[in-house]
Amino acid sequence: MRLPAVKFVPALAVALALSSALASTYFPREPGTTWKLSNGEVQKLAAPLTLRGVKVTPLQHVIGGKLVSEDLLDFSSGGVQLRGTRVQGRVAWYEPPLTLYPKGPLAVGQTWRSTSGGTTLTVQVVSQQALVTGGGKFNALLLRNEVTTASGGGSVNFAYFVPGLGTVRYVGANGGTVDLLK
């Protein structure tokens, strides 16, 4: 009996392929992906477009059926960068962009910081926690997000992030909680 030939694949090639697969499923990026939240907001990824020479994917924020704003996300770096926001047709552009999520996977204790136009975002992966929301049961990473401005203003909020799904719970600076429903 003859055994089939086994092709040797270098460990680096396997690691690169795995890294690429993780990056593509790390944060949802498929147009039409929708999140329904407990505060009545619906978030939806729109079709990618090019603004200022950069391919961005708008994350629409819809309340009561009305488009309120869009986050202009850039997935090209392997992580998720906030390139700008659009409200009532006006774009506020971040140059350099703010890093919302670095290339995954995330790990407890990891911290990243980015600054643009006087706004600094500092994120720390605090812990991993079991969590139940109206949207299901999750094993989420708790992220502490601190935003500070050049004028001295700032706020701290917490997001429960599930790789491959996104944020499943958000706790605002005022302590209010918003959960993923679907």
Image (tube, rainbow, N blue to C red):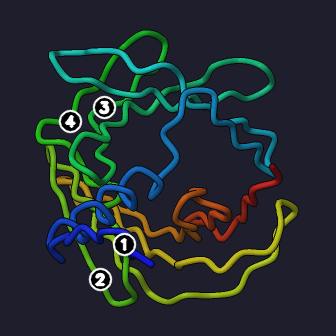
User: Closer to the camera: disc 3 or disc 1?
Assistant: 1
The circle on residue 105 is 1
User: Closer to the camera: disc 2 or disc 1?
Assistant: 1
> Badge 4 is on which residue?
94
Are the two marked residues, 4 and 3, in contact with CB atoms closer than 8 angstroms?
Answer: yes
The circle on residue 169 is none
Q: Secondary structure at mark 1?
A: loop
The mark nearer the N terminus, 1 or 4, is: 4
Q: Amino acid at mark 1?
A: Pro
Badge 2 local density, few (<14 within 10 Å), some, or many (20+)? few
Q: Amino acid at mark 2?
A: Gln
Q: Position of residue 6 (x, y in %)?
A: 29, 71
Q: Quadrant of residue 83?
A: top left
Task: Give the CA distance from mark 3 to mark 1.
Answer: 24 Å
The mark nearer the N terminus, 4 or 2, is: 4
Task: Give the CA distance from mark 1 to mark 4.
Answer: 24 Å
The circle on residue 84 is 3
Residue visible at 55% across and 30% down? 45
Badge 1 local density, few (<14 within 10 Å), some, or many (20+)? few
Q: 5 or 136, which lies in front? A: 5
Task: Give the CA distance from mark 4 to mark 2.
Answer: 23 Å
The mark nearer the N terminus, 2 or 1, is: 1
> Badge 2 is on which residue?
110
Q: 154 or 72, which lies in front? A: 72
Task: Give the CA distance from mark 2 to mark 3.
Answer: 24 Å
Q: 31 or 173, which lies in front? A: 31
Q: Which residue sits furthest right?
A: 134
Residue visible at 80% across and 25% down? 64
Q: Position of residue 20 (x, y in %)?
A: 30, 56
Location of the N terminus by quadrant is: bottom left
**Depicted 41 relative to depicted 48: above or below:** below
